Image (cartoon, rainbow, N blue to C red):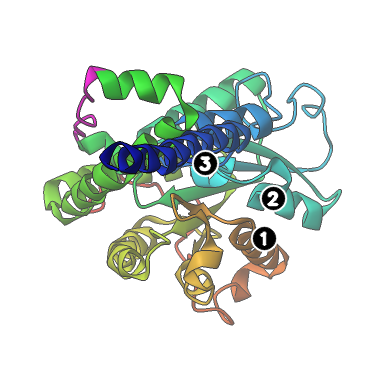
Amino acid sequence: MKKNSNHKIKIPLTFFLILFFIGIGLSEIVARSISFTIGTATGKSSAKWFQEQWKPINELGYRDYPIRYRVATQKKIIFIVGDSFSAGHGVKFSETYAAKLKELVGNQYEIFNISQLGASTKKEIENLTNFINLTKIKPDIIIHQYFFNDIEDYITFSSPPKAAPITRWLAKNTAIFNLVHSLYTYKTWGESYIHKLKSAYENEEIFKQHLADINHLHRIIAEQNAEGIYLIFPSIYPDEQLEISKKFAGKLKENFLFQCNEGAVLFDTYELIKETPPKERIVNLMDTHPSPKLHAKVGNALMKILTMPVTKRDAQDSSIIACNQPKQKKLSNTSNQ
């Protein structure tokens, strides 16, 4: 009787193990087939998405159409200088706010997107300067897109802790474990990342240096005799981070009003984001870059700014601040000069 009993136990256990390994196998097949982004741009699924969607790439490495065919255009020229928010991390090229704006302006403007993943303010200065020097294109309007993490130049981030050898092997060779490990790293490292960003904004000396970089970039815009549009994105998800970054956006507005050039405009996307349900603003829960819906809203808002008379841009919308300083006012290198 005892032998019989053991035999009966082995059958369901074997059946369970077979089902378990079948489930793992199916999960692996699914994990290898899907592609979606994670905010840190890590993991096999994210790499697959970039391989499929990160195009077109032009001669200078930006996610935009080739430059050489558009250099001789007779249209007005718009430059967009920014980071992953403007390059379109997590969304198709056709879903970016740059693409939406191009759709709306039609043949009136030619848009050149000079935006790079992970670009800080200092890197944006370098990108804009190099683009102007290499292409010799003269812009009529320069949109400077700003995000909460553009202060990164003044922060030292620790790398995610090194995983055990078996963990690294599994992450390298299995899609399902790679996905789980990527999500875990994103969550644990992301919390530290946000904390350090917040601390940098609260450090007066660091923030002063950061404002100097912003003013330097805006001085370059003024020297091009281009109209400047300063597009601010707060931290868009969750609402707690949105409200925290709103406070720091207030400091940026004060600096803008003190340093701006006549004709320049600041557009704070806070209200536009706030009116959008939290989960509809972001690419996904692991990638809090703007969703296609939010990109479309930003594109529409920018078109509204372009079609408004300069003197009335801040009359109907509290999210828009127009500069009334004398034209070609020299921008200082710090906010306190």
Residue with the mark numbered 2: 95
x, y percentage for residue 12?
Answer: 43, 43
Residue 132 pos. (x, y %)? 59, 27
Q: Nearer the viewer, residue 265 or 298?
A: 298
Secondary structure, mark 1, is helix
In reply to whether residue 163 is colored magenta, the answer given is yes
Q: Residue at x 84, y 52 (%)?
A: 106
Decide whether residue 195 is among the magenta residues: no
Q: Can residue 249 be seen at all in this image of the molecule? A: yes
Q: Is 107 placed left or right of 155 in the picture?
A: right
Q: Nearer the viewer, residue 187 or 80?
A: 187
Pointer 2 with pointer 3, Cβ within 8 A: no
Cα gap from disc 2 to disc 3, whole angstroms: 15 Å
Residue tagged 3? 37
Distance Cα–Cα, label 1 vs label 3: 19 Å
Q: Are marks 1 and 2 in contact (CB under 8 Å)?
A: yes
Please indicate whether residue 53 sits to the left or right of residue 39 in the image: right
Spatial CA distance of label 1 from label 2 is 7 Å
Secondary element at image label 3: loop
Give, as a single range, the part of the protein colored magenta: 156-165
Residue 333 appears in the picture as rendered: no
Identity of the residue drawn at 80% across and 53% down: 103
**Residue in front for this viewpoint, 70 or 36:** 36
With respect to residue 82, does 33 lie above or below?
above
Q: Nearer the viewer, residue 41 or 215?
A: 41
Q: Which residue is mark 1?
A: 296
Q: Amino acid at mark 2?
A: Glu
- Whichever of labels 2 and 3 marks the residue nearer the N terminus, that label is 3
Amino acid type at image mark 1: Ala
